[in-house]
């Protein structure tokens, strides 16, 4: 069986350091808001390249807190609009509607699956307050056109960096281009804890302090609540685990890139649409602009292909079968016609990829794909 992502094998590869980190926390007797979280926040902000990192409970909370903080600062108010990719995981959209803001969908570029920057400006109006870009599947979504629009219209740029830890654009990490960025450390991410976890990164001192306060019940001083806040904190054990894994993140991302390059070079089925390996006529590998959280393909008979691979002991997943605007939760948006997004969600399939995948597994996946329909 070729597992989609062998999480146990991944975590075993960090031993004995993971167990030592967990033991260190247990023996400390301090499990929340302690040294491990402070050190992880410092180390991750240095890795990303921002002044501040605030550990929170999960990636959705990171985005929720970002928008909530802008509302508390008077920068946004309920009813304002946030531009967001139509092709994204629903958490991006939930963070907007949770704060009584309005998501405005922009179709993706079919070559990258990320928001098409040249379709954004037509959606900007007097109610627009921000652009949320999502570095989907691990590929950088930032570019000069987006920065031009942010500057021209005075908008907040928010990065959803949940799937792109370590990704680069112009020799800077994603997570540093926005006024603020949300990160997820869900176990299956490139940088994953052993449960839920997340972070907000920013260079804005006032904003960072406000996010930290809202995430701690709206309180700076215990039992004194300035805001109607949340309880959203990264705990000590997960922070200790993330500190271990962070040290190897760039190396593991390089291994993902090797597997992705092998797939692209060797998958020969004419009906399979493979990821594009160039950006501005340069290799995404050389630019480090894709960290391959997911390796996704398109196939016009996706469900049949997935069953075929399953019958041949290859696990695959669909990221994602239903786009946000077609979800029951957003039935008021079901009427929207977003054909590029809908095509992606109908045809997309994620292949196995992880730092612990071996050459035999890679060859087996490629062989199965090349034999499909023969």
Image (cartoon, helix red, strand yellow):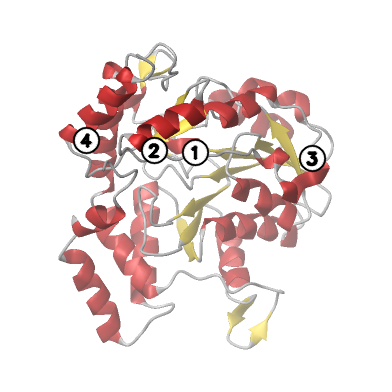
Q: Position of residue 89 (x, y in %)?
A: 57, 44
Residue designated by label 1:
318
Q: Residues within 10 Å of mark 1 (few under 14, many from 20)?
A: some
Find residue 220 and report its image quarter. Answer: bottom right
Find the distance from the CA under tag 2 to the CA under tag 4: 25 Å
Could you say whether the residue bearing mark 1 is in a helix, strand or loop?
Answer: loop
In the displayed structure, 176 sits above or below 242; it is above
Residue designated by label 3:
333
Find residue 45 and report its image quarter. Answer: bottom left
In the displayed structure, 3 sits above or below 196; it is above
Residue designated by label 4:
361
Residue 296 appears in view: no
**Image-based side of 250 in relation to 225, left or right:** left
In the displayed structure, 177 sits above or below 366; it is below
Find the distance from the CA under tag 1 to the CA under tag 2: 22 Å
Find the distance from the CA under tag 2 to the CA under tag 3: 32 Å
Number of dots carrying numbers: 4
Tag in front: 3 or 4? 4
**Discs 2, 3 touching: Cβ within 8 Å:** no
Residue designated by label 2:
167
Instruction: Identify the mark nearer the N-term, 2 or 3.
Output: 2
Could you say whether the residue bearing mark 3 is in a helix, strand or loop?
Answer: helix
Q: Position of residue 154 (x, y in %)?
A: 71, 37
Q: Position of residue 56 (x, y in %)?
A: 50, 65
Could you say whether the residue bearing mark 4 is in a helix, strand or loop?
Answer: helix
**Image-based side of 187 in relation to 97, left or right:** left
**Discs 1, 2 touching: Cβ within 8 Å:** no
Could you say whether the residue bearing mark 2 is in a helix, strand or loop?
Answer: loop
């Amino acid at each position: 069986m070729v597992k989609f992502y062998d999480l146990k094998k991944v975590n075993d590869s960090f031993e004995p350091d993971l167990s030592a980190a967990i033991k260190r926390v247990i023996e400390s007797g301090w499990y929340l808001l302690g040294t491990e979280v402070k050190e992880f926040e410092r180390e991750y902000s240095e890795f990303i390249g921002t002044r501040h990192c605030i550990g929170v409970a999960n990636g959705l909370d990171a985005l929720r807190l970002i928008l909530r903080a802008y509302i508390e600062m008077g920068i946004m108010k309920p009813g304002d609009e946030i531009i967001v990719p139509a092709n994204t995981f629903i958490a991006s959209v939930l963070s907007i509607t949770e704060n009584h803001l309005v998501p405005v969908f922009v179709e993706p570029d079919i070559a990258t699956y990320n928001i098409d920057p040249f379709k954004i400006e037509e959606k900007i109006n007097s109610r627009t307050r921000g652009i949320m870009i999502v570095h989907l599947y691990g590929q950088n979504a930032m570019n000069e056109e987006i920065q031009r629009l942010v500057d021209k219209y005075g908008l907040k740029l928010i990065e959803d960096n949940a799937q792109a830890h370590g990704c680069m654009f112009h020799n800077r990490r994603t997570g540093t281009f926005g006024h603020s960025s949300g990160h997820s450390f869900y176990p299956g991410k490139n940088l994953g804890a052993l449960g839920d976890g997340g972070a907000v990164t920013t260079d804005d001192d006032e904003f960072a302090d406000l996010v930290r306060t809202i995430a701690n019940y709206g309180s700076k001083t215990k039992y004194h609540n300035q805001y109607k806040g949340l309880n959203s904190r990264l705990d000590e054990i997960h922070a200790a685990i993330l500190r271990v894994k962070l040290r190897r993140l760039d190396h593991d991302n390089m291994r993902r890139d090797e597997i992705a390059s092998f797939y692209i070079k060797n998958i020969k089925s004419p009906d399979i649409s493979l990821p594009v390996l160039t950006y501005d006529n340069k290799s995404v590998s050389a630019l480090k602009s894709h960290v391959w959280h997911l390796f996704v393909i398109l196939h016009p008979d996706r469900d049949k292909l997935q069953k075929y691979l399953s019958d041949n002991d290859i696990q695959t997943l669909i990221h994602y079968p239903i786009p946000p605007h077609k979800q029951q939760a957003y039935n008021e948006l079901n009427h929207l016609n977003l054909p590029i997004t809908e095509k992606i969600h109908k045809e997309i399939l994620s292949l196995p990829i992880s730092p612990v995948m071996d050459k035999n597994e890679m060859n087996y996946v490629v062989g199965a794909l090349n034999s499909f329909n023969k």
